[in-house]
Amino acid sequence: QVQLVESGGGLVQAGDSLRLACAASGRTIRDLAMGWFRQAPGKEREFVASISRFGTSTRYADSVKGRFTISRDNAKNMVYLEMNTLKPEDTAVYYCAAGPQYARPTDYWGQGTQVTVSS
């Protein structure tokens, strides 16, 4: 079992940057793919980005490609999401997730952190 806790969300203006962090505990994340998902009000949860176990491969949703960067530090059991050039449509609750499947790591979930981007 792994517990995930997100931090770093907040209220920012369009064009600003934010860095989300996900702290994992309970077990090492070295053998898990990690990912970020988000859910906007009235919408379904959607994939944002994922990273392979050793960080050699990453995937992004088209809507964030070129603006967001996912990274991980296995020694610290941490995962990050650097978000640049934020847009109002990025407003959502962002969830950290983990699992064995790099394409969709969804076995474990955090509680989420709110990101609000004002125009």
Image: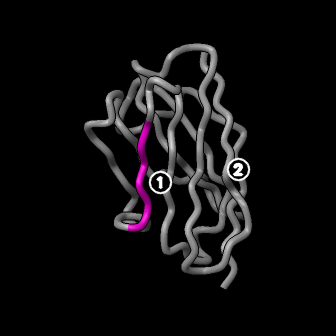
- Where residue 69 appears, as percent x and y from the top left, is 41, 55
Q: Please name the residue that numbered disc 2 is placed on.
A: 113
Task: Residue 19: say if magenta.
Answer: no
Task: Classify residue 108 as left or right of residue 30.
Answer: right
Q: Nearer the viewer, residue 113 or 78?
A: 78
Task: Read off the magenta span.
Answer: 67-72
Amino acid residing under circle 2: Thr
Q: Where 48 falls versus 22 (above or below)?
A: below
Q: Most extreme residue toward the left, as rendered?
A: 56
- Where residue 45 appears, as percent x and y from the top left, is 59, 52
Q: Judging from the image, what secondary structure is the residue with disc 1 in?
A: strand
Q: Residues within 10 Å of mark 2 (few under 14, many from 20)?
A: many
Task: Residue 70: say if magenta.
Answer: yes
Q: Most extreme residue toward the bottom, as rendered?
A: 119
When asked about the image quadrant of residue 54, the answer is top left
Q: Please name the residue that numbered disc 1 is placed on.
A: 48
Which mark is on residue 74? none
What residue sits 48% from the left and 51% below the top?
Answer: 47
Amino acid residing under circle 1: Val
